[in-house]
Amino acid sequence: MTDTKDPKPSVFLLIMLSALTAFAPFVTDMYLPALPSMTETFSTTPAQVQLGLTTSMLGLALGQLIIGPLSDKYGRKRPLILTLILFAVSSALCIFSTTIGSFVALRFVQGLGASGGVVLSRSIATDLCSGRALATVMALIGAISGIAPVISPVLGGWILSFSDWRMVFALLLAIGIVLLAASFRLPESHLAQNRQDLSVLQSFGQIRELVRNRTFMTYAVMQAAAMFAFFGQISASPFIFQTHYGFSAFAYSAFFAANALAIGIFAFLSTKFKTPQKSLITGSIILLVTASCVSAALILNAPAALFEACLFLMMSSFGLILAPSTALAMNAARKQAGLASAVLGAAGFLSGGIASPLVGLGPMKFSTAAVFMTGAILTFAIMRFAHRSDASAPQPSAA
């Protein structure tokens, strides 16, 4: 870390940043085991139920584009508190949804509320850390937040063993309230003297300058391509494991937890590479190879054990891609940390919002394979472009 930044973030701060980073997986993953049963509850189709996942990710994407620039102007703490209040209210309303239409709409609002924690956790980390320290903190947060997708579907599957999906959203409401209470203790990392002296419209208008930042955009687009495959897996996996292979909701949550744990482990291992670029190269190659294996296993109706083994390896590649690409992108746009975090997060969730309904079109095993391969090929291609660009530029020492 630089001399002007706190070299030792407090334990509370690290836990809070990890919890806020893990907020999105809780919102998107906890109710996944309930998707098949919700088609019966609402008397609708899998594609309609998956729209709840899509709208939540669109809310997460749009909310970050709004909150990020505002946090550059007004600081990080107040926007965080307001978005957590919105999340708590929308979560309570989701519990009482009686139609799939109202549920899908409320999931969008819930995504807006959760977006503050996602975008501001990266901004706060960027406020306090730089260079190698930022890459390390991002990787550690990624590894710790890997606990969230491990726990959330297991909790969801366990809750479904004695209740229904509404109880899952009651737990999400409780988590939101706890984070809201803790946020009042969070220090303001973006001090008034460091904020942009711009109007709100001018703050949003700076997105054009950010788009011209070639380094930032390269890593943002690479991450969005990886997220296309990542969220395709999230949306399709409940139906693949429960409908195609016949596992229970709780058994599916155990598979999901194992795969999520792979992401957390490999996010930590990404810090062991000499440079973040080397981690990205390795992760992109692994993603391309394993996505091909997963697609083949799915199309050829391979045994569940073989499919899961391939899927586990594919998920590990995301740990080598997401944390380093985040650190490299945020380092390249340090002066606009809030906006940069917003664009980075919005691109990923927008990509996921597109992928989620696509896996429900036609025979799921073919549409899912197509989504996996598209994301893997694009990630690998962008990695090659970034590698050629970095070869002619000074390399950051961040690990």
Image (cartoon, rainbow, N blue to C red):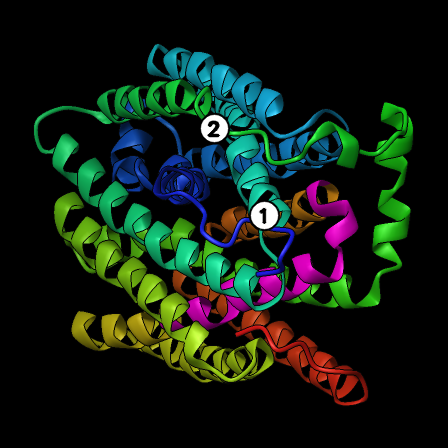
Precedes in sequence: disc 1 or disc 2: 1
Label 1, residues with CA under 10 Å away: few <14, some 14-19, many ≥20: some
- Dominant SS of magenta comes to helix
In the rendering, which numbered label is found on residue 189? Answer: none
Could you tell whether 331 is left or right of 31 in the image? right
Observer-nearest of 280 and 293: 280
Q: Which residues are magenta?
A: 316-338
Residue, disc 2: 186
Could you say which quadrant of the image residue 30 lies in? top left
Residue at the farthest left position:
162
Residue at 45 percent across and 82 percent down: it is 286
Residue under the image location 83 percent in, 52 percent down? 210
Say which element carries label 1: helix
Percent position (x, y) of residue 212? 89, 59
- Pick the front one: 283 or 82: 82
Residue 320 position, x and y percent, is 46, 72
Q: Along the horizontal axis of the image, is 388 left or right of 100? A: right
Crowding near the residue tagged with mark 2, few <14, some 14–19, many ≥20 C-alpha atoms within 10 Å = some
Q: Are marks 1 and 2 in contact (CB under 8 Å)?
A: no
| Image location (x, y in percent) of residue 302 | 24, 77
Q: Residue at x 42, y 16 (%)?
A: 88
x 85%, y 24%: residue: 200
Visible residue check, residue 97 = no
Q: Is residue 52 above or below residue 245?
A: above
Q: Which mark identifies residue 128?
A: 1
The residue at the far front in this view is 3
Q: Is residue 184 left or right of residue 153?
A: right
Residue 183 location (% of width, % of height)? 45, 24
Is 113 part of what is drawn in magenta?
A: no
- Three-letter amino acid code at the position of disc 2: Leu
* Gap between marks 1 and 2 measured at Cα: 13 Å
**Residue 324 magenta:** yes
